[in-house]
Image (cartoon, rainbow, N blue to C red):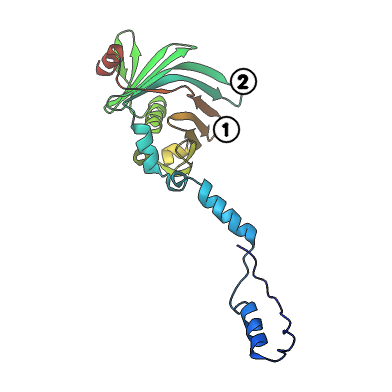
Amino acid sequence: MNRLVTTRLKPLRGFRGSGLASRQRRDAAPPAHATPVHPLLCTLTVLILLFISPLTLAFSLDDLQKQLSTPAVVKGPFVQEKHLRALPQPLLSKGHFILARDHGLLWLLQTPLRQDYRIRADGIARRDPSGWQTLPSRSAGAEQNRLFFAVLQGDSSGLQSDFDLSLSGDAAHWTLHLTPRSLLLKQVFSAIEISGGSFVERIELSETQGDSTVLRMPESSAETALSDRERRDFAD
C-alpha cells in the first residue's frame, strides 16, 4: 500500500483561475478523514496472516487431549532426574513405560533398582515377588504416579480439578503449565511444566521446598496393540 501524497499542481498556462485548475487541486488532495498507513505495517500484517498456522491460533486443551489420547498404546524409555538441594548432582533413574488407552499405565523402573508400578482406574499397585500389591490411595508415590498418568493421557479435565492450566504453542511444539489449586498439592508442588509434540516429551515438577524432578521421554512411539505379556500385567 503506497503512502498517500498531497501534490500541488500548478495551473496550466492560459487557464489560471479556470475550473480545470480548481478541479485538479481537488482531485489531488486526500479526503480530510484519510489516515496514511505505513507500508511496513501492511507488509507485517500480510506476513503474519500467511505464516501463522491456523492450528497455532486454535490449539486448545481439548485439542491437546485428543492428540495425546489418539494412539491405542504409547511406549518408550524414560530418564528421571531428582534434583535435591543437599546434593550437587541429580539422582538418576531409568526405565520403560507402557501407556494403554483402555487399560492404564505400566511404569517399569530398571535402574538403579528394579521396581514396577501399575496404574489403572481401580487404583495403583506395586509389584513384589508375590504379585501386584495395591498402594494406599493417598500415599505420596500414588499421588505422583496418578499425576503422571493424567499428564501422559492429556487428561485436561482431570488435571483441571486440582490445577490452573495454561497452554501455549501448537500441536508440534506445546507447553502446558500447571499451577496447583488444591491445598494438598500446594504443600508439595509450586509448579509443574509439561512439554512435547505428538507425545509428552518432558515433565518438570518443582517442589515447594526447592527440590525438583525432571522426567524425559524423548523416544516414545505409538503401537496398535499390547503384547501378550503386557496384557497379562494389566489383567493380573
- The CA distance from mark 2 to mark 1 is 14 Å
Residue at coordinates 57% horizontally, 25% vertically from top-left? 83
The x, y position of residue 202, in whole percent, is: 49, 29
Task: Please state if 69 lies on the left or on the right of 49 as rendered.
Answer: left
Residue at coordinates 39% horizontally, 21% vertically from top-left? 75
The x, y position of residue 150, in whole percent, is: 37, 32
User: Could you tell me the amino acid type at mark 2?
Assistant: Gln
Quickly name the residue at label 1: 210
The x, y position of residue 100, in whole percent, is: 32, 24
For label 1, the crowd category at 10 Å Cα-Cα, with few meaning under 14, some 14 to 19 and many 20 or more, is few
Residue at coordinates 40% horizontally, 31% vertically from top-left? 147
Quarter in which the C terminus is drawn: top left
Residue 13 vs residue 8, the one in the foreground: 13
User: Could you tell me the amino acid type at mark 1?
Assistant: Gly
| Image position of 201 with respect to 5: above or below | above
Residue 29 visible (yes or no) = no
Residue 87, image quadrant: top right
| Image position of 114 with respect to 56: above or below | above
Residue 135, image quadrant: top left
Circle 1: element type: loop
Residue at coordinates 71% horizontally, 80% vertically from top-left? 9
For label 2, the crowd category at 10 Å Cα-Cα, with few meaning under 14, some 14 to 19 and many 20 or more, is few
| Image position of 133 with respect to 33: above or below | above
Q: Residue 36, labelled with which disc?
A: none
Residue 95, image quadrant: top left
Q: Residue 89, labelled with which disc?
A: 2
Which of labels 2 and 1 is toward the front?
2
| Image position of 195 with respect to 2: above or below | above
